Image: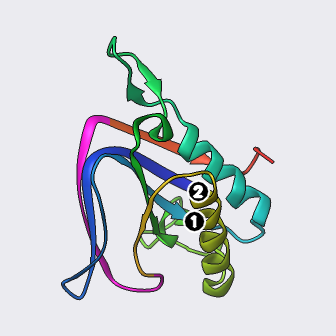
Amino acid sequence: MRAVAQRVSRAEIRVAGESVGSMKSGLLALVGVAKGDRPEQARWLADKLVHLRVFPDEAGKMNRSLLDCGAALGVVSQFTLLGDCRKGRRPSYNSAAAPEEAERLIEILIAEAERLGAPVATGRFRAQMEVDLVNDGPVTLILDTKESV
């Protein structure tokens, strides 16, 4: 699994003009699922996202997690993160998981984040989404479970 996590002051996810998920401060994670990814990777990624110390403490040092701040986690499935652009002009998505498997692992990630105590805002799987966000910092990190578990 691959994620691009952005610290945000707010974010909203819309499908066909309807708000399906919104949050105030927190981390918004765009998440791609690769062929061969496993449930333990989804749980690892959830744990990493909710415990990342990227929020400022009283001294302004990035030393607090979203759980420490009462912030939220946004999760948006995005298979294009697995796009391979090395050859030609059109990305190849051969390494992306099949939609059914990707949805199952995204659901595991969300359930684990909620179990850990994070409020979670989500998009709608397989939908054309509009994501509005205000990147705070900006702080943007890339996480990959390839060698984590």
Residue type, label 2: Ala
Residue type, label 1: Ile
Report the span colored magenta: 125-138
**In-front residue for pair 38/68:** 68
Circle 1 is placed at which residue position? 110
Looking at the rendered structure, the secondary structure element under dot 2 is helix
**In-front residue for pair 109/144:** 109
**In-front residue for pair 75/147:** 75
Residue 12 % position (x, y): 26, 65
Colour mapping used in the image: rainbow
Residue 59 % position (x, y): 34, 11
Residue drawn at 39 percent across, 16 percent down? 61
Residue 113, label in figure:
2
Looking at the rendered structure, the secondary structure element under dot 1 is helix
Residue drawn at 74 percent across, 65 percent down? 37
Q: Is residue 84 visible?
A: no
Residue 57 relative to residue 88: left or right: left
Q: Are marks 1 and 2 in contact (CB under 8 Å)?
A: yes
Residue 27 % position (x, y): 40, 48
**In-front residue for pair 42/110:** 110
Q: Is residue 15 above or below residue 77?
A: below
Residue 101, label in figure:
none
The secondary structure that most of the magenta stretch takes on is strand
Residue 75 % position (x, y): 46, 63
Residue drawn at 63 percent across, 58 percent down? 115
Residue 11 part of the magenta segment:
no
CA gap, disc 1 to disc 2? Answer: 5 Å
- Judge the density around disc 2: few (<14), some (14-19), many (≥20) Cα neighbours within 10 Å: many
Residue drawn at 57 percent across, 65 percent down? 110
